[in-house]
Image (cartoon, grey):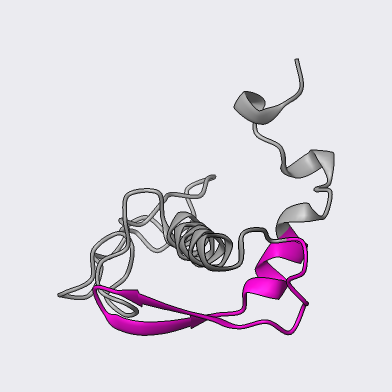
Amino acid sequence: MVARRNSDGHGGGGIHRAETPPSPAGQGEAGGAGRGRVPVGGARAAAFERGLAAARQCRDREGALDGVSRKHVETVIDGDGATEIKLGVWLANQRRPRPRRHRTPDRAPH
């Protein structure tokens, strides 16, 4: 929020919101940089989908994900070419319990 004064130069007893400047040309809501367009779910959803694709590829090849070390890197071929995913780190992060404060109402235990 940007504070600005009334046209007479005084605050007028309150803070008024300035209009939000438009985003730079070529950038949508998800930003213009990165690996092409980010899906509707956002950058986190796109990163999750990349990790999930790497996990599926590794499971299909190895038969299970039990023996994946934290250092394991999986190369996934996608529309943007080959992408290296740190699958071991991704799996460890998925298995780690999340703090309750980050849970959204639709993910809260019933």
Image quarter of residue 4 = bottom left
Find the residue positioned furthest to the left.
25
Q: With 110 as the anchor, is 35 left or right in this view?
A: left
Q: Nearer the viewer, residue 85 or 56?
A: 56
Q: Nearer the viewer, residue 95 or 24?
A: 95
Residue 71 image point, x, y percent: 74, 84
Image quarter of residue 81 = bottom left
Residue 86 appears in the rendering: yes
At x 23%, y 71%, the residue is 27
Residue 76 image point, x, y percent: 42, 76
The span picked out in magenta is: 66-93
Q: With 35 as the anchor, is 85 left or right in this view?
A: right
Q: Indicate whether 72 appears above or below 31.
A: below
Residue 6 image point, x, y percent: 37, 55
Residue 42 image point, x, y percent: 41, 56
Q: Quadrant of the C terminus?
A: top right
At x 73%, y 44%, the residue is 102
At x 34%, y 77%, the residue is 77
- Say if the magenta span includes residue 85: yes
